[in-house]
Image (spheres, coloured by chain):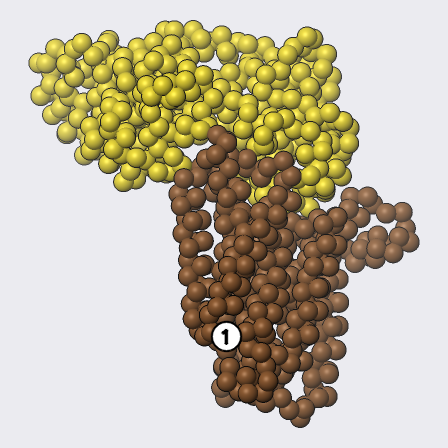
Amino acid sequence: MKNLFLPLFLLLVLTSCDRTSVSTHDNLEVKQEFARWFTIEKKDSLTLITVRNPFDTIQPSARLLLYPRQSNPPRGFEEYTAVPVPLQRISCTSSTAITFAGKCGHIDAVVSVSDANFVFNKTIKSRLVSGDVTEVAQGTEIWYEKLSQSAPEAIFVSMFDGQELDRIRDLGIIVIPFADYLETTPLGRAEWLKFMGAFFDEGEKTSRLFDTIVSQYQEIASLAKNANEHPAIFDGLPIEGSWYVSGGQSYMATMYRDAGASYIWAGEQGAASNVMAYEKVFAGAAETPWWRMVVNIPGTLTKEKLLAMDERYGLFKAVKTGGVIWSNAATIPLFEEGVAEPHLVLSDLVCYLHPTLLPGYKPRYYFRLDR
Amino acid sequence: MNVKHHTLKRPAVRITLLISGVMLTLVLLLINLMVGSVDISLPQLLNNLTGLEPADTTIVAILFKFRLPQAITALVAGAGLSVAGLMMQSLFRNPLADPSILGISSGASLGVALLILGAGAGSGTAFLTSGILGDLTVTIAALAGAILVMMVIIVFARTIQSHSNLLILGIMVGYITFSAVGILKYYSPREALQRFVIWGLGSFGEVSQSRLGLFVLLTTIGLAASFLLSKTLNLMLLGEHYAQNLGLNIRRARLFIILISGFLTAVITAYCGPVAFLGLAVPHLTRNLFQTSSHQLLLPASALLGGILALLCNLAARLPVFNGTLPISAVTALIGAPVVIWLIFKGNK
């Protein structure tokens, strides 16, 4: 720490005569309750954003300085990347970034995306057809020439380091890590709305919107918490004999708890998925009444289709008694939109797990398999 | 290749070896039923197998729907791959030949890649749970790809005289399919890629009880057909000219060998994914253990040894310490290669 003070002191002395410069002290930290992977600080017309790096606890993956685009970039923030706001042209390599941009009311700013085939957003889909939005990446491959041609000021990416990002910076494009998926709670993920909002100078609007989401989410969670029963639930599907089970501290484990369910692997370590043998999952979950799964198939899921995937699924009580809650990544925008609407995703689960709590509710992302 | 003339110097030793092989297979089958992520004790196992006591439905299901089909699949696939590999090694008189040498399993990979990875490009979505029919679709796609490549090879085999040229053609076909798979991988989303990679590491656990019957039947047909070729294979070992002088129709013989070895490889790869190493190593193990080059003995002995090694690998992959199920191709070489190395050193002394 000691050797940090001298440069800091020099920095203060050198910049103290400059009117637009600001010291990093006594900034106003924007209230943030759920998200863990970014922080926003406000100082007058400037916004300082830090995104943590999951692979490096000391060096953050990005320090961004947002300044009003009509003024000049402020001096004295050498370690920050200056970003003029509101951004006017952005590229999104994650579909959730598209959703958040839409929630901010700035879907028009999106000029390029990745994996066009998997985008659900109607506006972007039609602009992909008309050519107003272009596809600039597929899978892990970035097409630098197309990206450059689409001329975004900034690109929202889901990765943290690597040569790819340096090549993008070489094109004069600002790289903004968008790490909503690292959050382990539904509200934490949704709070990335504020992160996106800052880049469009929509901080107030997105804060209000987020507060509404939080109060709706918590209202439903408290209804479910006070329900008489907390039915048992498990999730996932095996891949070639191994089952990837959500850890006890994961996003889904939080969702189950908030939905008033008891997750049978709540004791499993960690926030990531743990691999488990099929037979072990079977031994633990055969008598569990509820089974949540996300399939990836054309059309809707039927019991026939499920049993055709693996006849052993028929041995689970959840399949026998109509306790399968499913979504379809191929046809339902659960991952793209659900992240910004955790209160609706939660309501979907609650309406099946506690049928009396939300009378007349029409689920949007999850459906129940007929017996 | 180490060609030794078939002598019956040690018939007693060989019979002992065969009998102990069969016994070992039965013991391994039983251990495969006992060991897994869920603890099932021997008394529990016996009670549930014999039905003497009221059975625990979960344990019965684990035994009969999970472990037994998987063990039988391992046994049959190990036997089939080893025989297919032996046939390739004898045909090409090349100790490095294995069931995948003619590109047939690459063909299966291409079929599955088109299904898992290619679906996204055409339809606008990638169907990661592999289409409406699930794992059955994967099997069909793999079978279609493998048979397509096999037909190409057979067309070549009818026109190309030289064995070594045919071998090179087979390897070339393999490279072409490999490239096609590479291009599909390049454009695939991460989840689809993960599923394809996992498929590519092989698994004995994907053949469910109701599909097991057909798998065993098809593989048995292939094995039986291969035994009919034992004399032809003995002649092949002598070299093309000798075999021809002894009255063998080389092209027809070659066609049958490719057809049957390819059929076994195609069926097993379709049901289990590409299982590495067994088809390459077991023929060497068998020749070393049985000290013979006669296919009347080598074929059944390879089948037996292949089954044993596959059961051992299946057991190791499912040990509770690994939590899940290790991919089978990661285990086969890990267990098999040291055995082959040891045997070669032992034979050298």
Foreground of the two, A298 or B11:
A298
Q: Chain of mark 1?
A: B
Crowd tier of the residue under label 1, counting other residues whose Cα lies within 10 Å: few below 14, some 14–19, many 20 or above: some
* Three-letter code for the amino acid on which mark 1 is drawn: Phe
Side of A246 where A42 appears, left or right: left
Query: Quick check: can you spot residue A91?
Result: yes
Q: Residue at x 69, y 19 (%)?
A: A352
Q: Of A251 and B32, which appears nearest the observer?
A: B32
Residue B257 drawn above or below residue A193: below
Colour brown maps to chain: B
Q: Nearer the viewer, residue B20 or A248?
A: B20
Q: Can you identify the residue that label 1 sits on? A: B92
* Residue depicted at x 61% and y 12%: A220
Residue A78: quadrant of the picture: top left
The image quadrant that residue B284 belongs to is bottom right
> Residue B211 in the image: x percent, y percent?
72, 50
Which residue reaches farthest bottom? Answer: B9
Query: Is residue A263 visible to us here?
Result: no
Q: Is residue B297 above or below residue B54?
A: below
Q: Residue furthest right?
A: B52
Q: Left or right of B339: which side holds A172?
A: left
Q: Colour in which chain A is shown? A: yellow
Q: Work out which quarter of the rendered image holds the C terminus of chain A and state it.
A: top right
- When the figure is inspected, residue B217 is found, relative to residue A105, above or below; the finding is below
Q: Position of residue B318 (x, y in %)?
A: 63, 55
Nearest the eye: A250 or B347: B347
Give percent across and percent down for residue B196: 51, 46
- Residue under the point 69% across and 84% down: B14
